[in-house]
Amino acid sequence: MAVEKVNLSEKLGRITEHWSPRIAATLNGQHVKLVKLLGEFVWHHHDDEDELFLVVRGRLVMRLRDREIEVNEGEFVVVPRGVEHQPYAAEEVEVLLFEPAGTLNTGNVRSAHTVDAPAPI
């Protein structure tokens, strides 16, 4: 196996669709995914997976049923399994996701945003 570095700006520059995560790396059964977000996502939760959202560029609002968390560049939030959440971005935001391989992006719901098998980037 080759050891290679990943340039986030270059990889994110290849992404043209919103809400369509792409796999940038695999690590110990986990996926490092990159995604561009814009607008409102669906309310959902994950029964078995925690999710990390690291903002690379822009500002993400993580809506929870009891509050909102603003996540700015260089910050991240971990949404524990079972916690209902809705990512929201008033303007385009670039995000790195870290979650177990096989995690469905829409969790317990299916919608137009569901990506069954994210492609590598």
Image (cartoon, rainbow, N blue to C red):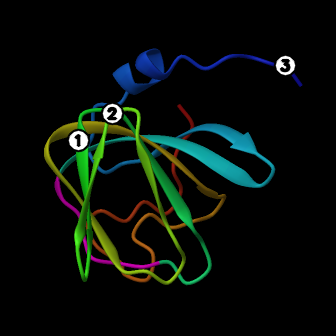
- Horizontal relation, residue 43 to residue 34: left or right: left
Q: Secondary structure at mark 1?
A: strand
CA gap, disc 3 to disc 1? 34 Å
The answer to whether mark 2 and mark 1 are in CB contact below 8 A is yes
Residue 7: where, in percent of width, then height?
Answer: 53, 16
* 32 relative to 95 in the view: left or right: right
Disc with the residue nearer the chain's start (3 vs 1): 3
Q: Position of residue 109 (x, y in %)?
A: 37, 81
The residue closer to the viewer here, 14 or 38, is 38
Lower sequence index among marks 2 and 1: 1
Tell me the magenta residue range: 39-45
**Residue that label 2 marks:** 73
Question: Percent position (x, y) of residue 100?
Answer: 66, 61
Extreme residue toward the right, this view? 1
In the rendered structure, find residue 59 and report the number of the disc placed on it: 1
Residue 20 higher or lower than 62, as above or below: above
* Label disc, if present, on residue 2 of the rendered structure: 3
- For the N terminus, the image quarter is top right
Q: Amino acid at mark 1?
A: Arg
